[in-house]
Amino acid sequence: MKVTQDILFAQDAATALTEWLAQQQYDRLFVLTDETTGRLCLPMLHLDEAQPITIAAGDVNKSLESLSGVWQALSDGKATRKSMLINLGGGMVTDLGGFAAATFKRGIRFVNVPTTLLAQVDASVGGKTGINFNGLKNEVGTFQTAALVIISTSFLQTLDGPNLCSGYAEMLKHGLISDVDHWSQLMQFDLDHPDLPTLQQLVRRSIEVKEDIVRQDPHEAGIRKALNFGHTLGHALESLAMETGHPVLHGYAVAWGMIGELYESCVRKGFPQDKMRQTVSFIREHYGEMPLDCKQYDRILELMKHDKKNVGGQILCTLLSDIGQLHINEPLSKEDIFGMLDFLREG
């Protein structure tokens, strides 16, 4: 896999994509959207030559059935190894579309045009693709880098508040694992009245943090596990919410996961309590609280045992001794996890 990828920051995504495509060689062009981005975002790109492929919206459709539908559409459209797929949408579309492209004909080129903040700073960059399977997040997938990622905050005007917050949680994570200045800027940003030019600068810095880590460790053998801060617990909370029929946006689950993992960082690694309290306060203010019952602790523990980063049945996570000071592959016991959940529930 090519470790680095071309990332283009553009005010006008349509012009940027058209100019880039004019320099490429391909025989057929396809564009994948979900029902929402097909309606709101596809008209902004003016892709008259592209054959459209549409899947149902929502993370529940990041499934084997949807993936098979994309493969079928590519086959029906006579796609070859020289064809190209444009993934226009949020993380569900870029993850699933990337996986479809990486596996069809053993791999065709694809472009990610992320339309949500979450996809811009997380899902569309870094080379991870995949689908959910057996009720587990991103259980099946591969590493495959997009030929191009176009980042344009103009798409963010179509987002509602919760989806903006969802993406911002990943940016908070990038701040915590990088440096105090970036973390401070993120803590001071007015999420309730977002200024898009300022947000674009923060997005650029956030992507730089992720790209730097991915460059060092493309296949998650070591330092890349820092990007999973908040996710060991967060993915389990997200799966539980889905199981109980009350699905939550990915970023909300990650934000709540960061509360637990920051608490454990304080207990185990001496993470400064003032920074922990400030971050937790910001999260509680903007993300609320996940309804959680202590009777659900054992189920959360079981879900955490399915995490792909585990080794030999041991649940592992990333902890911090301070902002930017990482400790990867830290083991979590049942008692550790229950303590994190108690703090998440009671503060």
Image (spheres, rainbow, N blue to C red):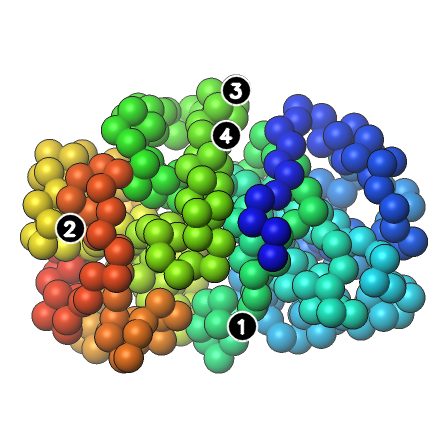
Q: CA distance from mark 1 to mark 2?
A: 30 Å
Q: Which mark is residue 197?
A: 3
Going by the image, does 180 lie left or right of 27? left
Amino acid beneath label 1: Val
Mark 2 touching mark 4, by CB under 8 A? no
Earlier in the chain: of badge 1 and badge 4, it is 1
Callout 3: few (<14), some (14-19), or many (20+) C-alpha neighbours within 10 Å? few
Where disc 3 sits, the SS reads helix
For the point 22% across and 37% down, the residue is 323
Q: Are marks 3 and 1 in contact (CB under 8 Å)?
A: no
Mark 1 vs 4: CB contact within 8 A: no
Tell me the SS state at disc 4: helix
How far apart marks 3 and 2 lie (CA) works out to: 33 Å
Using the numbered discs, state the Cα–Cα distance from disc 3 to disc 4 in whole angstroms: 11 Å
Who's the residue at 21% across and 77% down the image?
298
Q: Residue at x 25, y 71 (%)?
A: 315
Return the residue at label 4.
204
* For residue 216, side relative to residue 300 (left or right): right
User: How would you rate the neighbour count of disc 2 (Cα within 10 Å): few for under 14, some for 14-19, many for 20 or more?
Assistant: many
Write down the residue under mark 2: 265
Q: Which residue is mark 1?
A: 140
Mark 2 → mark 4, Cα distance in angstroms: 27 Å
Mark closer to the chain start, 3 or 4: 3
Q: Which of disc 2 and disc 3 is earlier in sequence?
A: 3
Kind of residue indicated by mark 3? Pro
Q: Residue 215 in the image: x percent, y percent?
A: 48, 45
The quarter of the displayed image where residue 82 is located: bottom right
Above or below 288: residue 297: below
Q: Whole-percent x and y of residue 304?
A: 30, 71
Of mark 1 and mark 2, the one earlier in the sequence is: 1
